[in-house]
């Protein structure tokens, strides 16, 4: 009888705290192992690129994971390294890889006319 | 009723064989098929793990939904796991099978009040050695609020925000969060499942439409209940809690307020509780002193019908400006939507229905029957019809959008996960070419139920069969008109 209560409590902990731990644990693991930079795309009035500045080392391949959590499509362009993701639909995510071979600061930007303030949707890539 | 022994009852003059009432003139309305005759089902219903196991599973599901609606940000409504699960899967399941077939089967597995139960009982699954006083203030719910009015209002108010709930994940998070929190807080103050009985926004329509359901929990044998003086199903014993929904399992006749929590299967020492399958709609005829037909339930029926019209216009209809109103694109538009919606549900529909009831009374030629009795009585004919409207509406949700479920199952938070390899499953509408036909068939089927129960209700409202026949004509006209209205809306 005592045991039954303990099992139930255990299952309850699993269903609540366990679920949270599993969700965030898995996401952390994924970020750590599968790509180096996570970028969130939103129109400027809803938060813009997040982060606005990305810093990566020179000469190593970068796996860039872009999540569009907005209600409109966005795009991603990094002209200095010929990177272009033409359209990331609302609510979807995409991954792209490139190798920055020179140091410096480079512009990245949204390539889809997403809002009145679309032109402000830019960010900075710092290659060290 | 006196405690007469069975032999005495038999000795009394045999009642004039009451004609059995049959659904569509075929199925005996008293027919029951008790599932507890199967040993496995009986054991399940008596196990303390039922329904807790299901509740724990849904706690897990709602945990994910909460995270998805909170952190999913402004992702497109259709791609948010929380929104999809709540408003496409859950809502459709409710309207499609859970309520029309299994009554309050959702309440059986609902995770919202589990924390309140846990707190009050101080245990999650066990009962405790001796009856202990439950934690919390354990107050009685005020008598004047023991009806559906509060839930009617709360549900209507919730639908004001339907345009946000289905598009903004955060709105759904707030709604679910407040329901869970409110269930807990109310549980601190009021006894047992007072929240479920009189406040939960999704409780009212489940209670109302459960009257139509093809399943019920009832006592098996009245005589056994009568002989069992210590009503353990009501007060509880070492096997289970007294009815958390404050019903008297040995007495109640109507599904409305039975949360199917299965405690009475555990607390009845005589195994006298049954889980019955029965003809659809059996409760629509119940009108006892304890469970009388009332205006609160009548209004619930009106509101549900009104909401269905407004939702159709706002979500599936062809008029863009209505969509903008319901989505709150402009404040004046949103406010006029609220005003129209409220007046339509609370006054226009009941008003029109009242006019038909007045005609019914006129046509019947019976002047003694109070109009209120005609009105409340016939309002129950709107229950099958209303369910039909909702089933039809649900087709319109699930067929076009169902395939999203595969996508979101693999990537619940739009973080780029692909748990089951279905994250890139394209949007595939299913059978949408047949959508109008399916909606039409659903409407007509439930319309037939409404008509059939209408004739039976007429017999209860008007004492003379001839009066009943004449009095039903205007109601039939009203039911037919509503059905055609929806057929026109759905089928064009
Ligand atoms: S009434 Fe509401 S909170 Fe209570 S069990 Fe049913 S759905 Fe859940
Ligand atoms: S009668 Fe009461 S105890 Fe029995 S299943 Fe219904 S709500 Fe639970
Ligand atoms: Cu953009």
Image (tube, coloured by chain):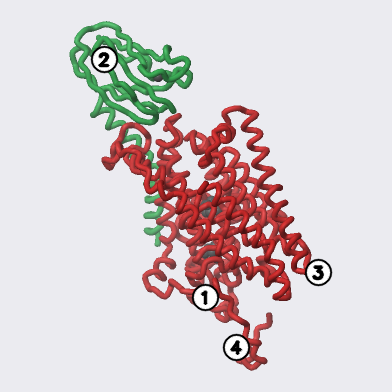
Chain colours: A green, B red
Q: Residue furthest top?
A: A104
Q: Could you say whether the residue bearing mark 4 is in a helix, strand or loop?
A: helix
First along the sequence among labels 3 and 4: 4
Give the image location of residue B375, x and y in percent: 71, 60
Q: Which residue is drawn at 38% across and 13% down?
A: A122
**Relative vertical location of residue B350 with respect to residue A27 in this rendering, above or below:** below
Q: Could you say whether the residue bearing mark 1 is in a helix, strand or loop?
A: loop
- Marks 1/4: CA–CA distance: 30 Å
Which residue is label 1 attached to? B26
Specify the quadrant of the image occupied by residue B221: bottom right
Discs 1, 4 touching: Cβ within 8 Å? no
Q: Which residue lies furthest to the front in this view?
A: B492
Residue B53 numbered tag: none
Q: Residue at x 22, y 13 (%)?
A: A100
Give the image location of residue B240, x and y in percent: 49, 65
Which residue is label 2 attached to? A56
Which residue is label 3 attached to? B368
Discs 1, 2 touching: Cβ within 8 Å? no
**Relative vertical location of residue B272 with respect to residue A71 in this rendering, above or below:** below
- Marks 3/2: CA–CA distance: 87 Å
- Marks 2/4: CA–CA distance: 89 Å
Q: Which residue is drawn at 25% across and 23% down?
A: A96
Of B275 and B227, which appears nearest the observer? B275
Specify the quadrant of the image occupied by residue B219: bottom right
Mark 2 on the same chain as mark 4: no
Give the image location of residue B366, x and y in percent: 78, 70
């Amino acid at each position: 009888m005592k045991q039954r209560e303990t099992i139930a409590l255990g299952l309850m902990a699993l269903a609540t705290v366990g679920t949270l731990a599993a969700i965030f644990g898995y996401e952390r693991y994924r970020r750590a192992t599968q790509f180096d930079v996570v970028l969130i795309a939103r129109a400027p009035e809803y938060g813009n690129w997040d982060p606005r500045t990305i810093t990566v080392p020179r000469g190593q391949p970068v796996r860039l994971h872009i999540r569009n959590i907005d209600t409109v499509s966005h795009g991603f362009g990094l002209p200095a390294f010929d990177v272009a993701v033409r359209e990331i639909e609302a609510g979807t995510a995409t991954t792209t890889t490139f190798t920055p071979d020179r140091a410096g600061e480079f512009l990245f930007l949204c390539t889809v006319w997403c809002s009145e303030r679309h032109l402000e949707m830019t960010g900075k890539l710092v290659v060290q | 009723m006196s405690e007469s022994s069975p032999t005495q009852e038999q000795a009394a003059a045999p009642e004039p064989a009451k004609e059995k009432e049959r659904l569509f003139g075929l199925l005996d309305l008293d027919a029951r098929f008790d599932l507890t005759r199967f040993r496995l089902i009986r054991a399940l219903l008596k196990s303390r793990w039922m329904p807790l196991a299901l509740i724990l599973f849904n706690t897990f599901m709602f945990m994910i939904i909460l995270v998805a609606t909170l952190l999913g940000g402004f992702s497109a409504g259709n791609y948010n796991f929380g929104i999809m699960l709540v408003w496409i899967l859950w809502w459709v399941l409710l309207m499609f099978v859970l309520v029309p077939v299994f009554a309050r089967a959702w309440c059986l597995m609902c995770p919202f009040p589990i924390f309140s139960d846990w707190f009050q009982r101080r245990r999650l699954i066990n009962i405790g050695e001796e009856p202990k006083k439950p934690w919390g203030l354990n107050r009685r719910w005020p008598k004047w609020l023991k009806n559906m009015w509060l839930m009617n209002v709360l549900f209507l108010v919730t639908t004001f925000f339907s345009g946000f709930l289905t598009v903004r994940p955060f709105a759904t998070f707030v709604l679910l969060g407040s329901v869970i929190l409110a269930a807990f807080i109310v549980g601190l103050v009021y006894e047992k499942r007072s929240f479920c009985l009189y406040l939960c926004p999704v409780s009212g329509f489940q209670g109302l439409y459960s009257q139509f359901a093809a399943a019920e929990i009832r006592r098996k044998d009245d005589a056994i209940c009568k002989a069992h003086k210590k009503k353990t199903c009501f007060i509880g014993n070492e096997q289970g809690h007294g009815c958390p929904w404050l019903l008297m399992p040995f007495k109640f006749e109507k599904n409305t307020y039975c949360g199917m929590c299965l405690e009475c299967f555990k607390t009845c020492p005589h195994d006298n509780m049954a889980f019955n399958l029965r003809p659809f709609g059996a409760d629509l005829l119940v009108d006892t002193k304890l469970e009388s037909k009332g205006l609160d339930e009548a209004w619930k029926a009106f509101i549900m019908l009104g909401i269905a019209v407004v939702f159709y216009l706002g979500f599936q209809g062809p008029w863009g400006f209505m969509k903008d109103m319901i989505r709150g694109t402009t404040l004046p538009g949103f406010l006029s939507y609220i005003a129209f919606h409220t007046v339509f549900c609370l006054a226009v529909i009941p008003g029109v229905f009242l006019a038909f009831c007045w005609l019914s009374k006129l046509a019947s030629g019976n002047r003694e029957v109070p109009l209120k009795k005609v009105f409340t009585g016939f309002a129950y004919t709107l229950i099958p019809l209303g369910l039909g409207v909702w089933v039809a509406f649900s087709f319109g949700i699930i067929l076009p959008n169902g395939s999203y479920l595969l996508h979101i199952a693999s990537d619940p938070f739009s973080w780029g996960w692909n748990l089951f390899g279905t994250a890139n499953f394209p949007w595939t509408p299913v059978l949408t070419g047949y959508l109008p036909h399916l909606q039409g068939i659903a409407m007509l089927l439930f319309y037939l139920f409404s008509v059939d129960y209408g004739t039976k209700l007429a017999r209860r409202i008007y004492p003379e069969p001839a009066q009943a026949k004449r009095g039903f004509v205007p109601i039939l006209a009203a039911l037919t008109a509503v059905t055609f209205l929806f057929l026109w809306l759905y089928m064009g």
